[in-house]
Image (cartoon, grey):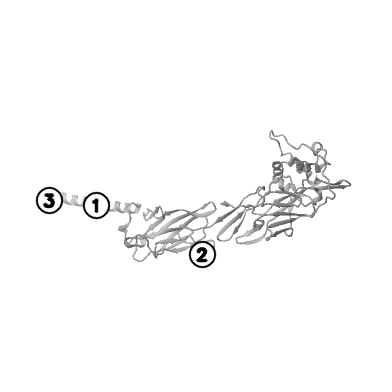
Amino acid sequence: MKAKSWMAGVAAAAILFASVIAPAGAMAEETTAPGASQTSTTCATNGNTITVKGTDADAFKTWNGKTSSSNRTFKVAKVANYKIDNGTSGGSVHLETVAASETSILQAMQELKSNDGTPLYQSKDLQGDPMNWLANAGKDSLIRKYADNPGVIGTVLEANKVSVDNTNKTMTLTMTEPGLYVIFDATQPKKQTKDTGDTTVEYAGFNNMLVGTPLTAGCNVSSNTGTVDLTSSANAKTGSTTTNRGGFQFTKVGVENDRTGLSGAEFTVYSDKNFTQVLQDANGKNVTATSGGAGLVDFSGFKLNAGTYYLKETKVPNGYWSGSAAKLQVTMKNDNGQIKLESITDMSAPASGLLSDGGNGYVYRNIKSITQLPLTGAMGMAILGVVAVLCIGGASIIIVRARKTKRSFAA
């Protein structure tokens, strides 16, 4: 399926984490933090909200066909508090791991390893606060790896604390207090499908996000607004795909004056090979068509999914043999986000030979009598076989009778 230019997912780890990461020197209270302290006149928290910005607000919702029943469900776990100091020379901020989760967070940190398998984070005694160390590490890959396995589970964020702004295409999550949070997409199922009839859009959901609530400009923190911008080309995203449903067509021909096109043949598509359940497309229309003057049987206006369907000629044109009515299997495929015809096969046993696949598409021919069956088809060859058997049988009778006559004369 074809991926859209914007796909709901997780922003690059550095972008998510940046809302709480000051330049390295801002962590001056940690003895392992490099550089000189960044200062400002005023540093403070600036609300408890985290905003996710996209280009399709529907990615933030759950879907039941064409209807959205609610917003997605999220779990949140606070992993660090902001520790802010404002003095005569300015302000500074760094992270302080939540004490209640520190043991599990430390275990998760042990999974962050160098190429030779050595844990990058050893202990608080050597490297200070674990979340502050991660901030100062400055490596997107480490932050992303931690976010995938953060050592915390989280609790469900109440539905009234998740709001979607369709106009601005944003989702806002309201936390209980400022700080750094891991946000989990707890929607079940995580993949949500919006069905418009003509198309389906599958939203794969969000990976874990590690992001903090806003800080004031005085903290000298990069991306301090607490916003995750999924529209940025720098962000890594997971899948959102759109599929355009489609139909198919073929040509109906006859014999003699109808060789180039036969009108009046009615076809119905069924969902089962026993032809008991008439198919309805995604818009609730019975899938039927009648050949026009040029013999075109046009199902292209119907909205079908990828899969196998069963086509039956439910009305044969006047003057044509009912035994030549078509019974066909139609297979539709997904071709780069567009549902298209893959194949049409004859379900007759043996095959009638009336279906052909020329350079301009499939053609099905009606005939007026069994003698007009093509000799290249299995049914036509079977008829030749029957004729051959009859001829052999007739010849045998003649030979037997000739021998009897000869013996009579001899007697």
Q: Position of residue 79 (x, y in %)?
A: 77, 47
Q: Is residue 411 visible?
A: no
Farthest residue toward the bottom?
318
Q: CA distance from mark 2 to mark 1?
A: 53 Å
| Helix, strand or loop status at disc 1 | helix
Callout in the foreground (2, 1): 2
Tag 1 or tag 3, which sits nearer the N-term? 1
Q: Position of residue 39 (x, y in %)?
A: 83, 45
Considering only vertical position in the picture, is 106 above or below 205?
above
Q: CA distance from mark 3 to mark 2?
A: 77 Å
| Helix, strand or loop status at disc 3 | helix
Residue at x 54%, y 61% (from the top left corner): 282
Farthest residue toward the right?
88
How many other residues sit within 10 Å of disc 3, few (<14), some (14-19) or many (≥20)?
Answer: few
Amino acid type of the residue that numbered disc 2 sits on in the rendered structure: Lys
Query: What residue did someone put label 1 on?
Result: 391
- Tell me where residue 328 sits by quadrant: bottom left
How many other residues sit within 10 Å of disc 2, few (<14), some (14-19) or many (≥20)?
Answer: few
Q: Which mark is residue 408?
A: 3
Q: Position of residue 162 (x, y in %)?
A: 72, 58
Query: What residue did someone put label 2 on?
Result: 285
In the rendered view, does 376 fall on the left or right side of 48?
Answer: left
Q: CA distance from mark 3 to mark 1?
A: 26 Å
